[in-house]
Amino acid sequence: MMQLHIIDETSPLKAVILGTAESCGPTPTPEEAYDPKSLEHILAGTYPKEVDMIKEMDAFSKVFKKHGVEVFRPSVLQDCNQIFSRDIAFVIEDKLFHANILPDREREFEAIDHVLGKIDPIKIIRPPEEVHIEGGDVMPWKEYIFIGTYTGNDYPDFITARTNKAAVEYIRSMFPHKKVKSFELRKSNTNAKDNALHLDCCFQPVGKDKAILHKNGFLVEEEYEWLVGHFGKENIFEITKDEMYSMFSNVFSISPEVVVSEKNFTRLNNWLREQGFTVEEIPYSEIAKQEGLLRCSTLPLIRA
């Protein structure tokens, strides 16, 4: 049996599910877009091609293998976008949570059955139906669990609001020994530069005590300021609105010393190197057109 273990975002990675871009189907219609950035590229005729996205994911897989990480991939479903494995499930401590995601993405979870079969079934948990939650909004960080949410009365109007208040309470009840801290995120169905689809679109810890952050992704200034205070201003890389749009905060840590980043994130990658990180640069700008990047494509199972 596989012993799941995730207590933070950066401890040395041992096993991960990396999504797949194979057979991801035709370009969606504007009506089928799940987020404003995809919609933008659908309308502009610049939506990414499968062949390019497969190349990008292969580059990511090679980096994992170079660092000795065990990589699982989903079974390929015909004409189904399975790139963003972070949406369908997430691990906290030794439990894997089956995310209550958009209903037509349910079969994506079934495509990781071969991995789930290695896990004690008692450790695989499906939250109650009223709990809306996706892995991009959930970040275990030592004694904390950070959760991105949106609790406005207009929550049902936002296809970009993926994690609700019930989810915050649910995670709190599941981990009474942890400090669960929630953050209200800015949502927009139409403007990608004003939309933090998930918490990892505007914030992510790196290393042991540093973070990438975008102020405008947060609706409540005090919550943003809490993060600045927690990590310390000198340890924070603040990204611009354009950099958030490019998904600068959606890098991925293989260990406290190694960060996988998009090769065009020059300003960020230089900063990371100045802080002593090894930066593994890969091309991922085509996948970024779907408002998801490196963290979104991964479902970490075991970190040492």
Image (cartoon, rainbow, N blue to C red):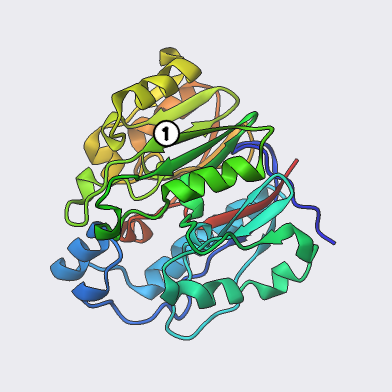
Q: Position of residue 3 (x, y in %)?
A: 80, 53
Q: Is residue 219 visible?
A: yes
List x then y, in percent, for residue 217: 30, 37
Q: In the rendered image, which residue does mark 1 sit on?
A: 269
Along the viewing direction, whichever of 280 and 153 lies nearer the viewer: 153
**225 sits to left or right of 43:** right
Of residues 125 and 69, which is closer to you in this image?
125
Kind of residue indicated by mark 1: Asn
Residue drawn where x is 26% and y is 63% of the image? 38
Q: Residue at 37% x, 20% y: name it.
A: 225
**Element class at badge 1:** helix
**Relative to 17, does residue 66 appear above or below in the rendering?**
above
Residue 90 location, quadrant = bottom right
Q: Position of residue 285 (x, y in %)?
A: 34, 55
Q: Quadrant of the N terminus?
A: bottom right
Query: Where does the image place residue 267, in percent across and percent down from the top left?
Result: 34, 31
